[in-house]
Image: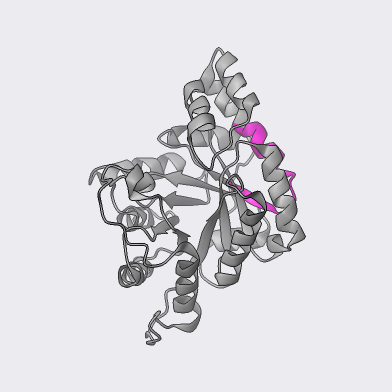
């Protein structure tokens, strides 16, 4: 065991892991996080807290993750390279560890032009691979990026993301391998809305032996409207939405019920794919549906990891 992370213990136990995304509010209302935490308590093993997702200003991931810790829940704090240089990132990592946050997901971050402050100055002092390497240096060697030693090391379980749906396809595994080499302990993928492509990606992952070096969680997204599915299929770069998903939602009498059926089926399918250690549910402002999905997929009770 590298850390005292509950997520790490469950993954190492071989149990099929369930994590879910919790989006902080566009305000200082901490009760939003508390409501999500209570709603999902007992249904997921860890809670991903996004870091100004899609470059839109929200409550900081550090603060939202600390609220979950206060509730006795385990967050995965997301850290993006977009808004902070190496000084700010290292400072926040120390603060997170001091507050009891044991999992960190390292991302580059969406470009600010997509968000609500498109003229903001970005930072990108480090990229996601460099960020992973820096966190590992701090944890395993007790040194800052400048080489200076620290007295107490942050004991965090290091996560990264992978997108099997961006091009060029073969490079996706190469990029993941770089993140593993840099020090990633677990991976959460982009939403799997094209199972055939994800299966081919996992075949390559296994051929490179990456599934034996890092734990991989398949990202899954319940889509509650047919229009949203069609929009993502046609307009969102880096996402692939199977035509069958669009048609099922467009023809459904109860679209939300059909969305749940689709995700439950996807969970059954990804569980059979070699190298998949769990699922990461991204409900995007529909967090209340997650308990329904977890229960129908037969993923209860969640392991205690004691």
Q: Residue, x 43% and y 58% (percent of image)? A: 108
Q: Residue, x 50% and y 36% (percent of image)? A: 290
Q: How many marks?
A: 0
Question: Which quadrant holds the N terminus?
Answer: bottom right
Depicted 209 relative to depicted 60: above or below: below
What percent of the width, then of the height, locates residue 198? 67, 44
Q: Is residue 223 visible?
A: no
Residue furthest out toward the front: 168
The image quarter containing residue 81 is bottom left
Residue 264 in magenta stretch: yes
The image quarter containing residue 252 is top right
Depicted 296 relative to depicted 275: above or below: above
Q: Residue, x 59% and y 66% (percent of image)? A: 178
Residue furthest out toward the top: 253
Depicted 50 relative to depicted 160: above or below: above
What percent of the width, then of the height, locates residue 242? 63, 30
Which one is in front, 116 or 169? 169
Residue 116 in magenta stretch: no
Q: Residue, x 75% and y 51% (percent of image)? A: 203
What percent of the width, then of the height, locates residue 235? 48, 32
Question: Which quadrant holds the C terminus?
Answer: bottom right
Q: Can residue 21 be seen in this view?
A: yes
Depicted 236 relative to depicted 205: above or below: above
Colouring style: one colour
What percent of the width, then of the height, locates residue 6? 53, 61
Which one is in front, 31 or 270? 270
The magenta stretch spans which residues?
A: 263-279
Which one is in front, 276 or 100? 276
């Amino acid at each position: 065991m590298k850390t005292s992370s509950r997520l790490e213990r469950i993954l190492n136990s071989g149990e099929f892991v369930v994590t879910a995304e919790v989006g902080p509010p566009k305000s200082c209302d901490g009760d939003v996080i508390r409501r999500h935490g209570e709603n999902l308590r007992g249904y997921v093993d860890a809670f991903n807290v996004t870091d100004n997702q899609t470059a839109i200003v929200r409550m900081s991931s550090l603060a939202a993750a600390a609220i979950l810790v206060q509730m006795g829940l385990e967050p995965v704090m997301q850290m993006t390279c977009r808004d902070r240089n190496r000084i700010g990132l290292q400072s926040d990592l120390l603060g997170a560890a001091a507050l009891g946050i044991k999992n960190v997901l390292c991302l580059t971050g969406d470009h600010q032009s997509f968000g609500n402050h498109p003229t903001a100055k970005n930072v990108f002092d480090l990229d996601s691979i460099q960020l992973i390497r820096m966190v590992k240096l701090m944890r395993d060697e007790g040194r800052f990026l400048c080489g200076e030693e620290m007295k107490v090391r942050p004991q965090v379980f290091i996560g990264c993301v992978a997108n099997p749906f961006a091009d060029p396809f073969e490079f996706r595994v190469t990029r993941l391998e770089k993140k593993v080499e840099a020090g990633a302990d677990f991976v959460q993928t982009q939403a799997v809305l094209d199972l055939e492509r994800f299966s081919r990606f996992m075949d390559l992952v296994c051929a490179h032996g990456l599934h034996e070096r890092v734990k991989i969680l398949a990202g899954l997204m319940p889509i509650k409207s047919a229009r949203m599915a069609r929009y993502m299929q046609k307009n969102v770069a880096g996402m692939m939405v199977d035509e069958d998903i669009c048609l099922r939602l467009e023809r459904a009498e109860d679209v939300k019920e059909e969305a749940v059926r689709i995700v439950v089926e996807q969970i059954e399918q990804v569980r059979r794919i070699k190298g998949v250690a769990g699922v990461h549910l991204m409900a995007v402002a529909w967090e209340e549906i997650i308990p329904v999905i977890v229960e129908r997929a037969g993923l209860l009770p969640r392991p205690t990891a004691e």
